[in-house]
Image (tube, rainbow, N blue to C red):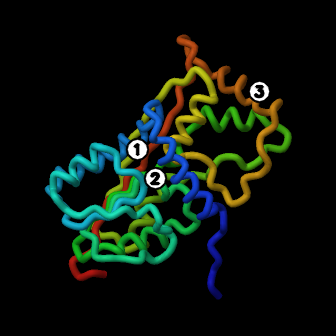
């Protein structure tokens, strides 16, 4: 009997949140710090292993730290934003694939990791970064306070980085490495945090997102968020970034 993958996320909503975030990036004031941190980390890893790809696929944005590195190498860079990471890729033979975000909202993460490996040429490298399970405790607390009696599903379940090594092994990645780092940002209002998340495609992609939050519930959420403010009047929020690195074997398996 074939097991069915639970449908937690909507691929259509995942694609829409990225498209909307990329459109929002045209504003000078748009938040970019999560994507830029991911891109900087990727560029540093590529430089450390002296990998200068000739054919790259980028799924997600390509901020300057990564874009500059790839441009200096003179290789061809393809836009993979139309690709569904949960389906076999329409092209293969890449010697480097970068994934910024997206994997936080896939129903079949092991399957997505297999598709990434299969799209590489033998010996090719993939680096995938996404927001992990230790993220956004202040926002989660505010959402629970907003609807204490019957809370709606408004935030994603996120991947625990401790499960990632096993997932990479199951997907057949060679030399898998899992790293995490944490960003802490201080906010004066809940709405600013939500705007920053939308700027970077970190909004809701749930298949069943529920009805919009009501005015009274939103007021409770804003108040609960500010209850966590520090002595400076701002609320610290944590974002955990999980980075997966691995290769396809030289045998192409």
Q: Which residue is mark 1?
A: 35
* Quarter of the N terminus within the rendering: bottom right
Q: Which residue is mark 2?
A: 101
The percent coordinates of residue 200 (x first, y second) are: 49, 43
- What's the CA distance linking mark 1 and mark 2? 8 Å
The percent coordinates of residue 226 (x first, y second) are: 65, 21
Q: What secondary structure is marked by label 1? A: helix
As drawn, the label of residue 226 is none
- The 10 Å Cα crowd at callout 3, few under 14, some 14 to 19, many 20 or more, is some
- At 42% across and 55% down in the image, what residue appears? 60
- At 45% across and 51% down in the image, what residue appears? 130
Q: Which residue is mark 3?
A: 219
Q: Quadrant of residue 106?
A: bottom right
Q: Earlier in the sequence, mark 3 or mark 1?
A: 1
- The 10 Å Cα crowd at callout 1, few under 14, some 14 to 19, many 20 or more, is many
CB under 8 Å between discs 1 and 2? yes
Q: Earlier in the sequence, mark 3 or mark 2?
A: 2
Q: What secondary structure is marked by label 3? A: helix
């Amino acid at each position: 009997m074939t097991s069915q993958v639970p449908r937690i996320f909507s691929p259509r909503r995942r694609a829409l949140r990225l498209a909307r975030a990329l459109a929002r990036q045209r504003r000078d004031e748009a938040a970019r710090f999560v994507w830029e941190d991911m891109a900087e980390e990727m560029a540093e890893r590529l430089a450390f292993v002296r990998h200068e790809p000739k054919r790259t696929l980028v799924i997600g944005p390509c901020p300057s730290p990564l874009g500059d590195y790839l441009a200096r190498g003179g290789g061809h860079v393809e836009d993979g934003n139309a690709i569904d990471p949960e389906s076999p890729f329409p092209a293969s033979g890449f010697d480097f694939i970068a994934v910024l975000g997206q994997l936080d909202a896939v129903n079949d993460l092991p399957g997505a990791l297999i598709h990434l490996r299969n799209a590489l040429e033998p010996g090719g490298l993939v680096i995938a970064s996404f927001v992990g399970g230790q993220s956004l405790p202040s926002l989660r607390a505010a959402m629970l306070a907003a609807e204490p009696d019957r809370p709606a599903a408004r935030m994603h379940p996120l991947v625990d980085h401790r499960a990632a090594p096993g997932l990479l092994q199951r997907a057949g990645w060679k030399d898998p490495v899992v790293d995490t780092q944490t960003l802490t940002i201080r906010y004066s209002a809940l709405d600013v945090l939500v705007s920053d998340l939308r700027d970077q495609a970190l909004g809701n992609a749930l298949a069943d997102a529920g009805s919009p939050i009501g005015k009274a519930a939103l007021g409770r959420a804003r108040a609960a968020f500010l209850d966590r403010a520090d002595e400076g009047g701002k609320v610290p929020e944590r974002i955990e970034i999980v980075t997966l690195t691995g290769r396809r074997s030289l045998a192409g398996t």
